[in-house]
Image (cartoon, rainbow, N blue to C red):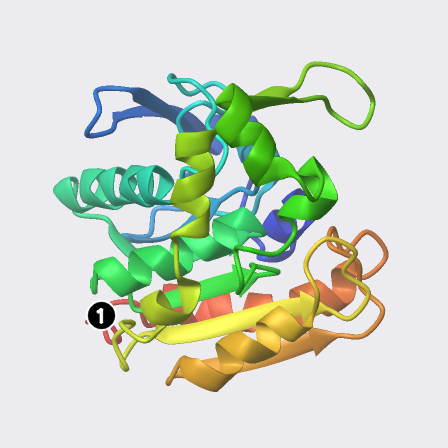
């Protein structure tokens, strides 16, 4: 997903001189690597990337790699929603410790689920942006692993998955699969503080996660705004303007009024 384009549209100065690499230790002792785009403001937005992605594809004042991804330490795990939620917690706490307020967390795809899970567990971030997150985590697995994935996992304990290009890959364990299947986004979203503002953006031509998932989020999250982007795929490859139009005002408002809307 090319969200780097969005970072420039927010009108941040993204010159190399104002980019700082920061390493943060999570609660498992792993180093999380991220890039801080410094503007001098005490407020910041944190970006959470999607499945097997990295911080290089994001908009944020601070964008980082989850453990097991990109430059961060740890082993990649399928699922891993709760661990990644705790990674985000470590990031927010780090910046709070140096008097920086996280006014919004933004996540794309799997990252969208992570920021919603974060808001359901920790009521310290006033705004959440969910870009193309998945409502029903039981869906999408058969398309990737086959209909017999549970039987294969019980038999062999794991499934080795190759990328579409046949390069590299990853391993799905029975434990990691059960973690995903037992992560209930409906239940989690009911626990989001009513004062937390949530924006969900989703494309009608999303080939990975159906747009119906966005509409399900809209039904249950109380302080919620839904923006459907007609014709947009999962990566918004031909709809960057339409993706920017709802997100940028939301981000700017959070940045300008972060202290006033803190919860």
Residue at the far left in the pictured view: 97
Residue 16 is left or right of residue 255, and the answer is: right
Q: Residue at x 62, y 37 (%)?
A: 149
126 is higher (above) or lower (below) than 110: below
Q: How many marks?
A: 1
Please tell me whether mark 1 sits on a helix, a strand or a loop: loop
* Residue receiving disc 1: 262
Q: Position of residue 239 (x, y in %)?
A: 81, 61
261 is higher (above) or lower (below) than 35: below
Q: Position of residue 21 (x, y in %)?
A: 41, 24
Quarter of the rendering containing residue 36: top left
Quarter of the image that includes the C terminus: bottom left
Quarter of the image that includes the N terminus: top right
Residue 45 is left or right of residue 212, and the answer is: left
Q: Position of residue 179 (x, y in %)?
A: 39, 43
- Residue 216 vs residue 160, the one in the foreground: 160
Q: Residue at x 27, y 80 (%)?
A: 195
Residue 148 visible, this angle: yes
233 is higher (above) or lower (below) than 85: below
Q: Residue at x 42, y 42 (%)?
A: 178
- Residue 239 vs residue 109, the one in the foreground: 109
Q: Residue at x 41, y 70 (%)?
A: 186
């Amino acid at each position: 997903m090319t969200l780097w384009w969005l970072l420039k549209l927010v009108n941040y100065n993204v010159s190399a001189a104002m980019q700082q690499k920061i390493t943060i230790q999570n609660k498992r002792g792993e180093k999380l690597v991220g890039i801080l785009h410094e503007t001098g403001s005490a407020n910041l937005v944190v970006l959470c990337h999607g499945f097997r992605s990295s911080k290089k594809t994001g908009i944020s004042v601070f964008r980082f790699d989850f453990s097991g991804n990109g430059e961060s330490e740890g082993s990649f795990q399928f699922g891993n929603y709760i661990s990644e939620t705790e990674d985000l917690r470590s990031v927010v706490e780090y910046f709070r410790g140096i008097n920086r307020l996280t006014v919004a967390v933004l996540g794309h795809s799997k990252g969208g689920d992570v920021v919603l899970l974060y808001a359901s567990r920790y009521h310290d971030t006033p705004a959440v942006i969910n870009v193309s997150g998945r409502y029903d985590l039981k869906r999408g697995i058969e398309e990737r692993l086959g209909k017999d994935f549970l039987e294969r996992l019980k038999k062999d304990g794991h499934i080795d998955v190759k990328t579409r290009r046949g390069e590299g890959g990853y391993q799905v364990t029975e434990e990691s699969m059960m973690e995903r299947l037992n992560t209930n986004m409906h239940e989690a979203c009911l626990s989001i503080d009513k004062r937390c503002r949530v924006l969900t953006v989703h494309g009608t031509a999303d080939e990975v996660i159906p747009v119906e998932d966005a509409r399900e989020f809209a039904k249950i999250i109380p302080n919620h705004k839904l923006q459907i982007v007609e014709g947009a795929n999962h990566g918004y490859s031909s709809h960057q303007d339409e993706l920017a139009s709802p997100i940028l005002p939301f981000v700017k408002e959070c940045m300008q009024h972060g202290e006033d809307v803190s919860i």
